[in-house]
Amino acid sequence: MRFLIPTLLLFACTRSLPPLEIEIQGRRAVVDPSGLQRDAFATISVHDPYLAGPATYDAIELTALLSQFAPDWQKEGRLLFKCADGYLAEVSVADLKPRQAFLAFNRPGEEFHLNNAATPISLSPYYLIWSGDSPATAQGRPWPYQVLQIRITALAPEPLPNAPPPVRLGERLFRQKCQSCHQLGGIGGSVGPELHRPVNVTRYWKTSYLEQWIANPSAIRQGARMPAFSGELSAKEIGHIVRYLEYLDRQGR
């Protein structure tokens, strides 16, 4: 399958853009991206995994925005994108290249929505998109929408260096698949419930049901909002995540 080659068409941003909060080293600022230089803006075509096909957006080149409003961003380890619904997406600074990631703010000729859902979902104010990716690569990247804030921070430390290998693997999988929506001790997204404080989830869910829930929530609760992970995680990997949660509880962390 051929890669979808993005088209970059420079234009002057004459419209007023929504404010964006940027936090670095504990300092927060609400910035106006409208004032960026002309070459920071582009009209770009990407393979959008939500739409399962090509889509065109007006967007801001991410590294240009960061360099303007947070010049020391490359000295940090990761970017955390906070969304209106509490979702938290993480991108490694080391993995970010120029002309690769963009913050979209408009879809020319279309509503700035995801229209393939039962109810259209607004992407405003900003939507993180990626250029030059094959469909398979695009699917593996974070595409958070309704982005309100970018927090630039150090890489998270290895929290369990002495834990057994299955627990460390479960911790890594939790960060990749669960932390965007769930918090552990106040760290993570807030779409779903906190799983560790004040009582760890493994104390009030049976292990078998918790593993089933991660695999297919709708099989446990009708109308569950959480997506099924059976297509992304094996039963063994789901077990590793539960072992990690159990280990945190035993350690009293």
Image (spheres, helix red, strand yellow):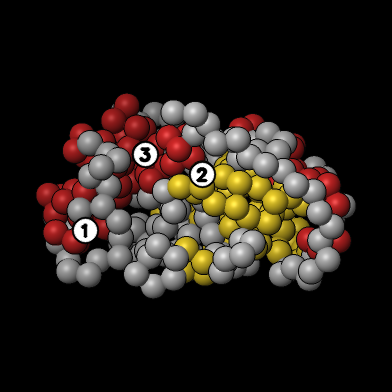
Please name whichever residue, 181 or 249, is drawn nearer the observer in this view of the structure. Answer: 181
The tag on residue 173 is 3
Q: Is residue 40 above or below residue 146?
A: above
Label annotation for residue 47? 2
| Nearer-the-camera pick, 81 or 144 | 144
Where is residue 95 shown, x and y percent of the image? 61, 33
Disc 3 or 1, which lies upstream in sequence?
A: 3
Question: How busy is the neighbourhood of tag 1: few (under 14 within 10 Å), some, or many (20 plus)?
Answer: many
From the image, state whether disc 3 or disc 1 is nearer to you: 1
Viewer-side residue, 137 vs 162: 137
Locate residue 228 relative to residue 7 in the image: left or right.
left
Whole-Å distance between the Cαs marked 1 and 2?
A: 29 Å
Q: Amino acid at mark 1?
A: Pro
Q: For mark 1, give the secondary structure.
A: helix
Residue drawn at x 81%, y 54% as measured from the top left: 11
Query: Residue type at mark 3?
Result: Leu
Q: Is residue 134 above or below residue 40?
A: above
Q: Percent position (x, y) of residue 144?
A: 52, 55
Residue 32, visible in the rendered structure: yes
For mark 1, what is the residue? 217
Q: Callout 2, which amino acid? A: His
Relative to 61, residue 97 above or below: above
- Is 210 placed left or right of 47 in the picture? left
